[in-house]
Amino acid sequence: MELNDIIFYIFGAITALSALYIMLTKNILYAAFALILTFIGVAGIYVFLGAEFIAVTQILVYVGGILILLVFGIMLTNRLSGKKVISSAYNKIMGFIVAGGLFAILLKGILEANFSALGWIDKSKFSDSSIPAFGLTLMTDYVLVFEIIGVLLLLALIGAVRIAGNVRKEGEDGV
Amino acid sequence: MAFDHLLFLGALLFCIGLFVVVTRKNAIMVLIGIELMLNAANINLIAFSSFDPNALQGQIFSLFIITVAAAEAAVGLSIVVKVYKYFQTADLDKINELKG
């Protein structure tokens, strides 16, 4: 086993264990912090798969943006008067049956499909750094989608501010 | 790094996200579960894309998924904050009126 593989499995273990912690903990704030670890583990896996740009975007957007929003959401939607922010799980057995059943089905599907035997999957070569090719593809073949996704993001942010902000009546302006 | 192990990790993340979404009643926890599921989809896309050095569709689609996840989190959290202001709770079972 090479060093690459060992680091890869360490990142995978970080991801899986912190996701399991999110599943088991009752404290919402701890779950949000464990989510940071999950995202960083996933970003490490992206680096090993030759997607450095996506890894950096993952850390910037998820850890820097979404996690901050989540922590602010926790702060604004709980009365933080000294007690812990608890949200216990309900219907655990039914939830476990649904999620575990789906996991079993997916596991069986992955094992049966035997992706490693497909022709175009060459196990020996994971592609190297691909940032130049990625930028070229994004700015030529997918430039329309790229622009549309930017407009979508702008709309979502304006909408979020409009929904969460205080609405001021027109008539009260002059008062 | 075995290719199947990546897909197992994606399946595990997706199922944990599903479990969190199904069993928790706090709206923030449901959003956390949705983020986990979106990440699982991203792992699968990038795992398959890593064998494709020229086209890179998987990476581009995962970039779009990350953007949509950011938009979803922003709008979702602002709705949760507004709902909390009205109902004084973020418990999804206690929010049972439509017209405020």
Image (cartoon, coloured by chain):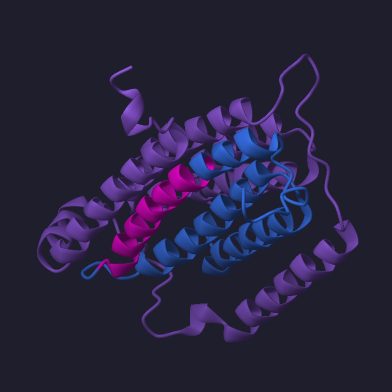
Chain colours: A purple, B blue
The quarter holding residue B51 reads bottom left
Q: Is residue B74 magenta?
A: yes
Q: Position of residue B5 (x, y in %)?
A: 59, 63
In depth, the one of A45 and A32 nearer the eye is: A32
- Residue at 37 percent of width and 32 percent of height: A169
Residue A43 in view of the camera:
no
In depth, the one of A37 and B69 nearer the eye is: B69
Q: Quadrant of the C terminus of chain A?
A: top left
The magenta region covers B56-77
- Residue at 69 percent of width and 54 percent of height: B97
In depth, the one of B98 and A6 nearer the eye is: B98
Q: Is residue A39 above or below residue A137?
A: above
Residue A124 located left or right of residue B52: right
The quarter holding residue A138 reads bottom left
Residue B80 located left or right of residue B18: left
The quarter holding residue B59 reads bottom left
Residue A14 located left or right of residue A85: left
Q: Position of residue B62 (x, y in %)?
A: 37, 59
Q: Position of residue A148 (x, y in %)?
A: 21, 60
Residue A138 in view of the camera:
yes
